[in-house]
Image (cartoon, helix red, strand yellow):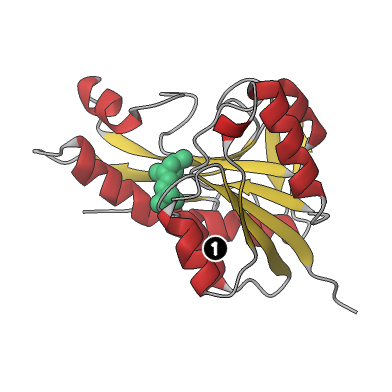
């Protein structure tokens, strides 16, 4: 019998990556909950409308980061997830949280890591004169945006690009890359070896995507 892997998705806003994951309808995956730290997140409404279990756990309701993360763990673990996906979850997580989900917590970051960890990645790529930009899916470790890389997607930086036009181009790629990474995870194809991920399905090369103009 093919038992589906249970996935919890964490979001904070529009949730377009979460939507891409839901629409991908991955055969071996079941999205068991979508949780947001903001009740007004547009993505939460979309998830509810599409019949998913949703929860809002507001960080303002807790005295600090540790207390919020501890509560978050409790809520997430009630769904017994095999994988937790940070899909635009705009909170820095405690080391305890990251360690609790070692090897089963992944994040999508809108830059070609290790360049431009943190915020404002597209503007920083433009300011640095980069000719390419992109996104990274990685396992989460306590150091921000630094865990083993599962996949990266590359787009060109075009003349006249603004942070918005670049973000839009990168986002299209995020929507392809995240479902692929989750598909690889649930198939058991991602093996963490130190800071590298050995993708048994991709033979090391086709987990990188390059879009041309
Ligand atoms: C994406 O660009 C993602 O890379 C970053 O936050 C953004 C979330 O967008 N972590 P959405 O909520 O998935 O539309």
Kindly identify which residue carries mark 1.
21
- Give the x, y percent position of residue 155: 31, 45
Above or below residue 51? Residue 119 is above
Who is closer to the viewer here, 212 or 103? 103
Residue 31 position, x and y percent, is 67, 65
Instruction: State the residue in front, 35 or 27.
Output: 35
Quarter containing the C terminus: bottom left
Is residue 202 visible in the rendered image? The answer is no
> Circle 1 — which element?
helix
Q: Position of residue 188 (x, y in %)?
A: 78, 57
- Seen from the viewer's position, the closer of residues 83 and 2 is 83
- Residue pushed farthest bottom? 1
Identify the image quadrant of the N terminus. bottom right
Which quadrant of the view contains residue 195? top right
Asked if residue 41 can be seen in this view, the reply is: yes
Q: For the point 41% across and 24% down, which residue is it?
A: 116
Q: Is residue 93 above or below residue 189?
A: above
Q: How many marks?
A: 1
Q: Nearer the viewer, residue 207 or 172?
A: 172
């Amino acid at each position: 019998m093919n038992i589906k892997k249970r996935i919890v998705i964490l979001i904070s806003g529009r949730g377009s990556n979460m939507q891409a994951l839901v629409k991908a309808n991955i055969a071996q995956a079941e999205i068991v909950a979508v949780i947001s730290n903001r009740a007004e997140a547009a993505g939460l409404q979309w998830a509810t409308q599409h019949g998913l279990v949703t929860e809002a756990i507001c960080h303002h309701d807790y005295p600090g980061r540790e207390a919020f993360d501890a509560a978050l763990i409790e809520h997430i673990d009630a769904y017994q997830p095999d994988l937790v996906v940070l899909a635009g979850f705009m909170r820095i997580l405690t080391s305890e949280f990251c360690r609790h989900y070692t090897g089963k917590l992944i994040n999508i970051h809108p830059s070609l890591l290790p360049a431009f960890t943190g915020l404002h990645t597209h503007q920083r790529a433009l300011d640095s004169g980069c000719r390419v930009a992109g996104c990274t899916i990685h396992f989460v470790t306590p150091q921000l945006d630094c865990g083993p890389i599962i996949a990266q997607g590359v787009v060109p930086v075009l003349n006249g690009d603004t942070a918005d036009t670049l973000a839009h181009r990168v986002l299209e790629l995020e929507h392809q890359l995240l479902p692929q990474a989750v598909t690889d995870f649930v198939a058991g194809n991602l093996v963490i070896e130190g800071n590298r991920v050995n993708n048994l399905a991709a033979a090391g090369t086709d987990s990188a995507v390059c879009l041309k103009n």
